[in-house]
Image (spheres, helix red, strand yellow):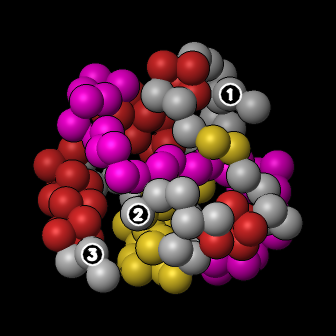
Amino acid sequence: MSDSAVPDFFDRFPMRRVTSDALDAVLADGSAELDVLFLWGRDCPNCDIAKRAILAQPQRLSWPQVRWLHDNVYEDAAMATRFGLHGIPTFFVFRHGRRLGRITSWPGIDAFRTAIDDLLARAD
């Protein structure tokens, strides 16, 4: 399930793999304040850019109350269809199953961190 350009990404920045048929149950379990769903694809150059950036500064994208999830949408077309993807990488942010936002493409570490920090600050 790893991609060829960054083969150890999910070992170095652990994310829980989730498929389209299990996503709702995972999001509803309430074990995280926020869930970030990383939708990516094997041999996707823009996904590799995001992965390399995340690995360059993983501590900046780690929050104790955030759970990272991922799915390779090339292997799980139902997930891509569910979210109407037009490109990857795409990140969706959820709070207890409710979708709060979408980050399309890779905006960079600073913008990504700001977006998540803002959502955490607005906790229910």
Location of residue 111 by image quarter: bottom left
Residue found at x 72% / y 52%: 18
Near mark 1 (Cα within 10 A), the count class, few <14, some 14-19 or many ≥20, is some
Of labels 3 and 2, earlier in sequence is: 2
Question: Disc 1 versus disc 3: distance between alpha carbons?
Answer: 33 Å
Q: Nearer the viewer, residue 30 or 70?
A: 30
Q: Label 1 sits on what residue type?
A: Ser
Task: Please tell me the numbered disc located at residue 33.
Answer: 2
Q: Secondary structure at mark 1?
A: loop
The residue carrying mark 3 is 123
Task: Give the secondary structure at mark 3.
Answer: loop
Three-letter residue code for mark 2: Glu
- x then y, percent, for residue 8: 57, 17
Foreground pick, 88 / 70: 70
Residue 23 drawn at (x, y percent) = 72, 65
Are there few (<14), some (14-19), or many (20+) residues within 10 Å of tag 3? few
Residue shown at 34% from the left, 34% from the top: 54
Q: Which residue sits at x=27%, y=75%?
A: 123
Q: Give x and y (percent) for residue 97.
A: 57, 76
- How far separated are the C-alphas under marks 3 and 2? 8 Å
Distance between the Cα atoms at labels 2 and 1? Answer: 27 Å
Q: Are marks 3 and 2 in contact (CB under 8 Å)?
A: yes
Residue ID for mark 1? 2
Q: Which residues are magenta?
A: 55-84
Q: Magenta stretch containing residue 62, yes or no?
A: yes
Give the secondary structure at mark 2: loop
